[in-house]
Image (cartoon, grey):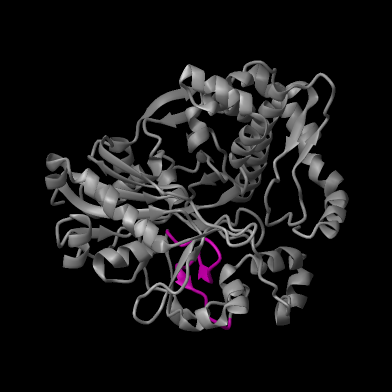
């Protein structure tokens, strides 16, 4: 590798970070560009963003990192990861056709033809509702239905890293471990589905609009003169294809073994495994490709995971925000103190964490169960944390059973992992040690690891992980608390959805927004 540092870009929902790492995993420079607004909404529930916001953020944040001349002179590569399931439409002249629809957008395609000729086959395996829900969630179909002119003009329908990589190199290519979402992608074989395939018809995007796929770690191109002028990067610098933000987060937290699971306490809460075979996390749900060759990342996600913490804070935490301001701490830090005021199990209060769509449970809603007069705001806050973890525990159990593996360690990532209380509750609930990486920027670290492996600094990801990943703390489970949680999980939580399903279905029929 030419230089001592790998420059990693992590393009998120609210900000873009440019980070330089050395081969020991130390972040030697960082610049964060917070967008003026994460997205704009022309209608309720919509979320769109101008893709040039992300490019301008990259140029600005990279420029600030390069102000450190020692770091600038040692950068040997750049790699880009980003939020998933958000796409850029470009015309034949590579101009942006329309704003990108951001992953948390809630609009739905009509799909007036339903599942078409596949309806009978889906009904035979009991997947009609799930398949139709997935199809309606494919926002490329929404564009086809509502903006046919824009879809006709779209020559390239690509991910954010593919777009930003093109702006740097003039080349269009996407990594096999970056693709994740509503695209006609065969994860097992790392290729686009043929248009004759039933799975293509659930996400019907013309194949000539989709980019070439390259193996993770490939050099997709080199920074052009234009890219250099816009960013300050050296012309000819290698641009490395890496995985999506969750895939990078998983390796960046050292999760490269099937006995470890990566838990992400982000806007969408997820639990992800790294296993050496393709195993669907749930029947007919895809298993994503991992960054490391030969590995796959089955994943269960709670769409409105730690978003619920922000929701609770905004709706019920006005006084908490004032008190936190007086103390000079964040409202989350202040509210986390409430977690210590309530015993495990929240004195009978239980939360079912379906505040957003769930693929296998399309009609479900969120619920608080067991409310009583003695429950306080602290009880409700802790029940949210516990409810999210119960959902992740269920996902871990399902995936472990299907993959025939046993998880013995967890790593924690995302905003919630900054909280000692959340990490300890998680350890207690799972009955497993929770390892907190030395950096909260595990997606960026995973990017850098990919670059170092690609450039030959390390022979493989195991060697890179040993050199670059360390943990600032490990939370050991309190097994007495785990016994309490295990009883609640098996005796109450696991049966909730089945008992409430008919009520959820009635609610779905009565509400216009589902």
Q: Is residue 460 visible?
A: no
Vertical order, 248 against 421 (above or below) = below
- Quadrant in which the C terminus is drawn: bottom right
Residue 129: x and y, percent?
Answer: 75, 65
Residue 308: x and y, percent?
Answer: 63, 39
Does 182 appear in magenta? Answer: yes
* Span highlighted in magenta in the image: 178-196
Most foreground residue, 227 or 280 = 227
Vertical order, 384 against 483 (above or below) = below
Q: Residue at position x 31%, y 63% from top?
A: 165
Does 83 appear in magenta? Answer: no
Q: Residue at position x 14%, y 61% from top?
A: 235
Q: Residue at position x 71%, y 56% from top?
A: 360
Residue 401: x and y, percent?
Answer: 64, 46
Q: Residue at position x 38%, y 53% from top?
A: 81
Q: Is residue 466 visible?
A: yes
Residue 3: x and y, percent?
Answer: 14, 48
């Amino acid at each position: 590798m030419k230089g001592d540092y790998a420059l990693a870009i992590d393009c998120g929902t609210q900000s873009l970070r440019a980070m330089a790492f050395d081969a020991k995993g130390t972040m030697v420079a960082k610049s964060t560009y917070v967008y003026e607004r994460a997205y704009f909404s022309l209608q309720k529930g919509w979320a769109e963003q101008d893709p040039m916001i992300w490019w301008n953020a990259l140029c600005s944040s990279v420029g600030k990192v390069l102000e450190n001349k020692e770091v600038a002179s040692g950068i040997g590569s750049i790699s880009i990861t980003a939020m998933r399931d958000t796409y850029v439409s470009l015309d034949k002249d590579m101009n942006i056709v329309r704003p990108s629809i951001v992953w948390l957008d809630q609009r739905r395609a009509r799909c007036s033809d339903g599942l078409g000729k596949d309806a009978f086959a889906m009904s035979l395996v009991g997947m009609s509702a799930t398949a139709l829900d997935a199809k309606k969630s494919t926002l490329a179909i929404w564009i086809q239905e509502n903006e046919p002119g824009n879809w006709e003009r779209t020559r390239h329908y690509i991910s954010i890293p593919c777009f930003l990589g093109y702006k740097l190199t003039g080349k269009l290519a996407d990594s096999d471990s970056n693709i994740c979402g509503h695209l006609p992608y065969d994860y097992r074989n790392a290729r686009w589905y043929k248009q004759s395939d039933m799975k293509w018809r659930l996400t019907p995007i013309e194949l000539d609009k989709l980019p070439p796929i390259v193996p993770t770690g490939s050099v997709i191109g080199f920074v052009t003169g234009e890219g250099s002028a816009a960013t300050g990067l050296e012309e000819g610098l290698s641009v490395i294809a890496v995985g999506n933000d969750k895939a990078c987060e998983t390796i960046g937290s050292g999760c490269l073994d099937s006995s470890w699971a990566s838990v992400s306490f982000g806007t969408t809460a997820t639990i992800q495994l790294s296993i050496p075979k393709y195993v669907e996390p749930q029947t007919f749900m895809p298993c994503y490709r991992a960054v490391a060759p030969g590995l796959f990342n089955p994943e269960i996600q709670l769409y409105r995971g730690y978003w619920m913490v922000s929701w609770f804070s905004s709706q019920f935490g006005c006084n908490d925000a004032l008190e936190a301001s007086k103390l000079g701490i964040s409202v989350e830090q202040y509210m986390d103190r409430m977690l210590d005021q309530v015993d495990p199990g929240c004195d009978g209060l239980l939360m079912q964490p379906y505040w957003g769509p769930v693929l296998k449970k399309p009609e479900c809603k969120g619920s608080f169960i067991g409310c009583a007069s003695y429950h306080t705001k602290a009880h409700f806050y802790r029940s949210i944390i516990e409810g999210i973890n119960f959902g992740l525990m269920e996902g871990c159990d399902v995936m472990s059973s299907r993959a025939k593996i046993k998880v013995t360690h967890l790593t924690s990532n995302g905003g919630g992992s900054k909280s000692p209380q959340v990490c300890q509750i998680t350890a207690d609930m799972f009955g497993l040690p929770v390892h907190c990486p030395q950096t909260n920027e595990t997606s960026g670290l995973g990017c850098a690891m990919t670059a170092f492996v690609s450039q030959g600094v390390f022979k493989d990801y195991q060697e890179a992980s040993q050199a670059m990943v360390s943990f600032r703390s490990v939370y050991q489970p309190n097994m007495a608390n785990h016994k309490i949680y295990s009883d609640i999980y098996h005796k109450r939580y696991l049966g909730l959805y089945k008992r409430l399903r008919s009520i959820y279905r009635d609610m779905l029929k009565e509400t216009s927004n589902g």
